[in-house]
Image (cartoon, rainbow, N blue to C red):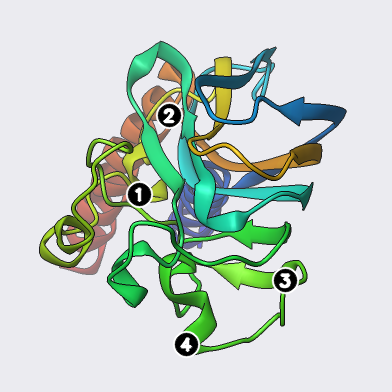
């Protein structure tokens, strides 16, 4: 009876430890900016902020979403990216939307974005007029980021069609969430003033296994084997 109780306790503790390792944490940051994106300038607007996403221990990123509230301007002029801590993760959010879809160097002429970029979205922001027509106003909804990492000033619209998305939000997966996150936005053609009203960063992390947790699991596993052997000997 004691052996059965010991096994039950060991198994229960191992389940608890495993659940602790599998737990995820979501941290949300919202930044009110209300700053103009320089018109017709490759130098753009940079928002860099040092964030403590996981104050207790190290945490690995499992998911990232970013939201942009941009008013005014000409959507087809905008280029933007999100860079993570330590220069590891890098995602192209916007790259002159509509350029590849319309086979034109000018892109879409709508004005403004109030969108969320997520790896779980169904459609790319680059082709948003295929799915919604803002009729010159702001674009809404949840979208895949552009993700195509090509020179933003290229004058060849077909380059967008030929390239695969490699700079996506999944590039942050597994990285340390703590450190400097950078949002960059640029307006690459003159005419029409865009303003970054605000942006939001949502980071989901999974705590990295702590040494003491791994030690406990190892000891419990060893104890479980010994209890099992003891029980077999008693039954024999």
Q: Position of residue 184 (x, y in %)?
A: 55, 27
Q: Which residue is mark 1?
A: 168
Residue 33 - label: none
Mark 3 and mark 2 lie on one chain; the one further toward the N terminus is: 3
Residue 140 circle label: 3
**Element class at badge 3:** strand
Q: Is residue 172 above or below residue 224?
A: above
Of marks 2 and 4, the one in the foreground: 4
Q: Along the polypeptide, which appears first: circle 2 or circle 4?
A: 4
- Residue at 20 percent across and 52 percent down: it is 229
Q: Is residue 236 left or right of residue 60?
A: left
For this orientation, the residue located farthest to the left is: 162
Label 4 SS: helix
Residue 40: percent from left, percent from top: 55, 30
Measure the C-alpha gap from mark 1 to mark 4: 21 Å
Looking at marks 2 and 1 on the same chain, the residue that comes earlier in the sequence is marked by: 1
């Amino acid at each position: 009876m004691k052996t059965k109780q010991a096994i039950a306790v060991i198994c229960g503790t191992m389940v608890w430890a495993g659940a602790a390792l599998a737990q995820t944490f979501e941290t949300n940051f919202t930044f009110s900016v209300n700053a103009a994106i320089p018109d017709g300038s490759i130098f753009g607007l940079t928002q860099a902020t040092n964030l403590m996403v996981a104050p207790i221990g190290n945490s690995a990123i499992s998911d990232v979403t970013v939201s942009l509230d941009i008013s005014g301007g000409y959507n087809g002029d905008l280029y933007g990216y999100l860079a993570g801590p330590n220069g590891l993760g890098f995602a192209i959010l916007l790259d002159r939307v509509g350029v590849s879809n319309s086979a034109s160097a000018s892109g879409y002429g709508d004005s403004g974005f109030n969108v969320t970029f997520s790896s779980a979205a169904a459609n790319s922001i680059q082709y948003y007029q295929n799915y919604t027509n803002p009729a010159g106003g702001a674009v809404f909804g949840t979208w895949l980021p552009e993700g195509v990492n090509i020179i933003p000033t290229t004058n060849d619209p077909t380059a967008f069609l030929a390239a695969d998305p490699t700079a996506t939000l999944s590039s942050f997966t597994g990285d340390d969430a703590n450190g400097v996150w950078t949002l960059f936005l640029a307006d690459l053609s003159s005419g029409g003033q865009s303003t970054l009203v605000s942006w939001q960063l949502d980071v989901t992390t999974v705590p990295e296994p702590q040494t003491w947790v791994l030690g406990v699991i190892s000891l419990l596993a060893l104890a479980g084997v010994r209890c099992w052997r003891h029980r077999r000997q008693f039954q024999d």
